[in-house]
Amino acid sequence: MIDTAALLTWFDSAERPLPWRRPGTSAWGVLLSEVMSQQTPVARVAPVWEEWMERWPTPADFAAASRAEVLRAWGKLGYPRRALRLWECAQEIGEAPVPSDVAKLLALPGIGEYTARAVACFHYGRNVPVVDTNVRRVYARAVDGQFLQPQPSKKELAQVEELLPAVNGPRFSAALMELGALVCTAKSPKCEECPLRTGCAWQLAGCPQPSEEELTRAKKRIQKFKGTDRQVRGLILDVLRGASGPVPQSSIDVVWPDAAQRSRALASLLNDGLAEQDSQGLFHLPA
């Protein structure tokens, strides 16, 4: 099971000095870090977050930017729709404070269950369960005795909520997430360093390995990048971000040899509002 005292003691010495954990970081800064960090390593996020907070320290500042500025600043963080949804979120917040209530956070554009709970917990100190892939993995091993994390489910919030201590709940949540990121990793967990080792259900069960069928299912859930439409979309966006003005179709055609896939990727960018085509048939970032 989860030894709260052992976990918090470990976290006191192992906590990474991430920039958004600095004292005085605003709710907007925490919200921004959580959105940026989804499916993106924090090492890549940190310098971009620093730049954004200097450039757009409040939601109102960010809302005043153009979508083209936002997409250029997003760079290669991946999943650029997140950038536009953040911009829509900032438009909604305006000069008001970032909400502290989970329900009100969920009402904002582009804010899902994880982000809403993370902001409420890590900035406002609300003792609410926060479940990401790291927490899901730690729970699967320490509580359920399974090496592989299950797919997200409706019951997981209630399960994690049962673990939350009445005191230091938000710090416990951060520690649980940090443990999954640094020690209880997906492929090669560092069990000898784990503060939960003596009570871990997976350890107590003799560290049973997943079956071939379970491994196959897990591999199918891993999203590939090379050769996918996502990669082609990124290459096209690179052209638009780097251009000083609208570009012709020929500038896009050179980025990928498969015409059908290239056309599909471009159409999806237009459909998602990440690119636009003018009356002369030229392509550019949205204004």
Image: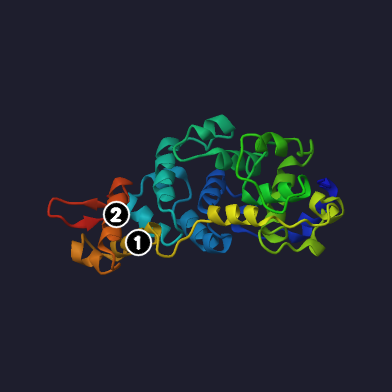
Identify the residue at horizontal 68%, vertical 59% (top origin).
185
Q: Is residue 67 left or right of residue 283?
A: right
User: Which mark, by number, is residue 232?
Assistant: 1
Marks 2/1: CA–CA distance? 9 Å
Which label's residue is closer to the chain start, 2 or 1?
Answer: 1
Q: Compared to 257, does 15 lie above or below?
A: above
Q: Is residue 223 left or right of residue 12?
A: left
Depth check: give the residue in front, 245 or 55.
245
Identify residue type, mark 1. Val
Depth check: give the residue in front, 57 or 156.
156
Label 1: few (<14), some (14–19) or many (≥20) C-alpha neighbours in 10 Å: many
Identify the residue at horizontal 52%, vertical 34% (top origin).
106
- Secondary structure under tag 1 reads helix
Q: Is residue 126 visible?
A: no
Residue 265's spot in the image, x, y percent? 31, 55
Of all residues shown, which one is farthest toward the right?
Answer: 198
User: Which mark, by number, is residue 264?
Assistant: 2
